[in-house]
Amino acid sequence: FVMPSEILQVQETNQALESMKGKDLLNYERVFCHDYPDYLLKSGYLKIKTKTAELVPFKFNKVQKILDQKISELQSAGKPVRIWLLKFRQGGCSTFVEAKIFSNTSQRENINPLIMADQKEKSSHLFEMSKLFQEQLEKDRPHLARPLKKSNEKKLEWEYLHSQIIITSAENGNAARAFTYQLVHLSEVAFFRNLNTVLKALLQAVPDHKDT
């Protein structure tokens, strides 16, 4: 389900990495993640919690592969990515979206994602995934873990990148108006009490661009 051009990129990168050692390898991988942040998503470098309370590398399941393919198709066609998911329990869609957001925000400049669920507690649960990604990346791959400027219950902000993941809930109807966002994850929208208000705000806050 990965685009042929992306397969070629990953293969070429793996060949280049095999021929390098030490600092050259680390620097190459850091630059490559900046230019192609989905490498972080697809490399197995991000860690997730399992139902049995284990930390394991994030690897795509069948549903996540289909979702990733659809995003690639839209971007290749020059279209902004706008996907509504009739989500089922434990399908891994939220985990995929959070990993996608983290990969792009932690490696590139000037990215503002918004994570919003119907309740504050659910938003916080999603946000904890990003915090875990950062924590484990600092431990396992410190050359790819960009330094943080702020880490609290409302945001993860990276030093020097001017990028930040912002967390809120639909209980705050004006939250979607606060910034310009490139990436947005709305979770449990069926339970938003003010969905129309949120969507109207996001129409003004999210550019109509293929990278959004």
Image (tube, rainbow, N blue to C red):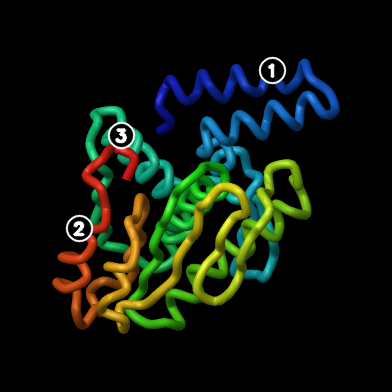
Amino acid residing under circle 2: Gln
Query: In whole angstroms, how far apart are the C-alphas of marks 2 and 3?
Result: 21 Å
Q: Quadrant of the C terminus?
A: top left
x then y, percent, for residue 70? 31, 39
In screen coordinates, is 140 left or right of 106? right
The residue that mark 1 highlights is 16
Q: Earlier in the sequence, mark 2 or mark 3?
A: 3
Q: Mark 2: give few (<14), some (14-19) or many (20+) Cα within 10 Å.
A: some
The disc placed on residue 204 is 2
Query: Callout 3: few (<14), some (14-19), or many (20+) C-alpha neighbours within 10 Å?
Result: some
Sequence-wise first label, 1 or 3: 1
| Placement of the N terminus among the 4 image quadrants | top left
Q: Is residue 89 above or below residue 31?
A: below
Numbered disc 3: secondary structure? helix
Placement of 1 over or under 155, stated as above or below:
above
Q: Callout 1, which amino acid?
A: Ala
State which mark lies toward you, 2 or 1.
2
Q: How far apart are labels 1 and 3 at the CA level? A: 26 Å
Closer mark to the observer between disc 2 and disc 3: 2
- Name the residue at 50% across, 58% down: 164
Residue 81 in picture, x, y percent from top left: 27, 45
Residue 75 — which label? 3
Q: Residue at x 42, y 21 (%)?
A: 4
Mark sitting on residue 8:
none
Left or right: 200 with respect to 83? left
